[in-house]
Amino acid sequence: MTIVVGENVENVRITVQQLTDKPAEIAIGAPGVTYTYLNIVSENITDADIDIVLINFRVEKAWITAENVDPDSIVMLRWDLVAEVWVSLPTTRIGEDNTYYYYQAESPGLSIFGIGYALAPAPAEFEFSNLVIEPSEVRA
C-alpha cells in the first residue's frame, strides 16, 4: 500500500484486516459478488491528510475460474462513511502468477473495502400475445 499525503504526518499506524464477511456496522454488503472485505484502520492520519492511496491486492485464479468471470472485471469498492454507499474505485490488473491475479486500486482515503465483481444485469424479458402478421407486397 502506498499513501501519498499533502502535508507531513508523523507516527502513522495502518492496520489491514481481511474479513470473510461484511462488517456488522455496515448495513449493506458490497454490490455484486464479493471475494473478500478489507478493513483498513489508521491512526494519526485522516482522509483530509491523504491525496491518494494505492492499494495492491490479489485474487485467487481458482476463485475467478469457479465464478466464470473475466479477471479484468474484478474491482475494489470503498465504503463511503458519510454517504453510506459503496463507491467503485479505479482498479487495474497489474500482473499474475500461477496462483493469483494481482491488482492495484486508487482510493481517496482509508475505510472498509470490498473486492469482487458486479453481476451482469438480467436480460429483459418480453412476452408477445395476439400477434398478427400481414402479407406485404414486394415490387421489382
Image (cartoon, helix red, strand yellow):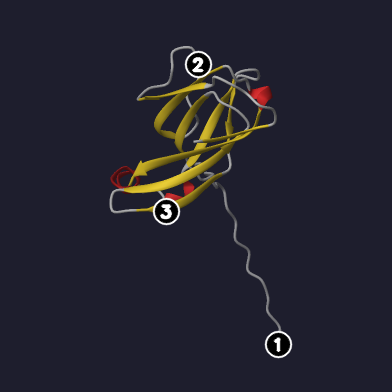
Q: Write the residue at 43% across / 39% down.
A: 57
Q: Earlier in the sequence, mark 1 or mark 3?
A: 3
What is the secondary structure assignment of the residue under circle 2? loop
Label 2 sits on residue: 26
Label 1 sits on residue: 140
What is the secondary structure assignment of the residue under circle 3? strand
Task: Indicate the position of residue 35 as horizontal and vertical percent values.
Answer: 38, 34
Graded by Cα atoms within 10 Å as few (under 14), some (14 to 19) or many (20 or more), the crowding at tag 1 reads: few
Graded by Cα atoms within 10 Å as few (under 14), some (14 to 19) or many (20 or more), the crowding at tag 3 reads: few
Label 3 sits on residue: 95
Q: Earlier in the sequence, mark 3 or mark 2?
A: 2
Residue 126 visible from this viewpoint: no
Report the Cα–Cα distance between label 1 and label 3.
Answer: 60 Å
Residue 108 visible from this viewpoint: yes
Q: Nearer the viewer, residue 48 or 104?
A: 48
Task: Indicate the position of residue 26 as horizontal and vertical percent values.
Answer: 50, 16
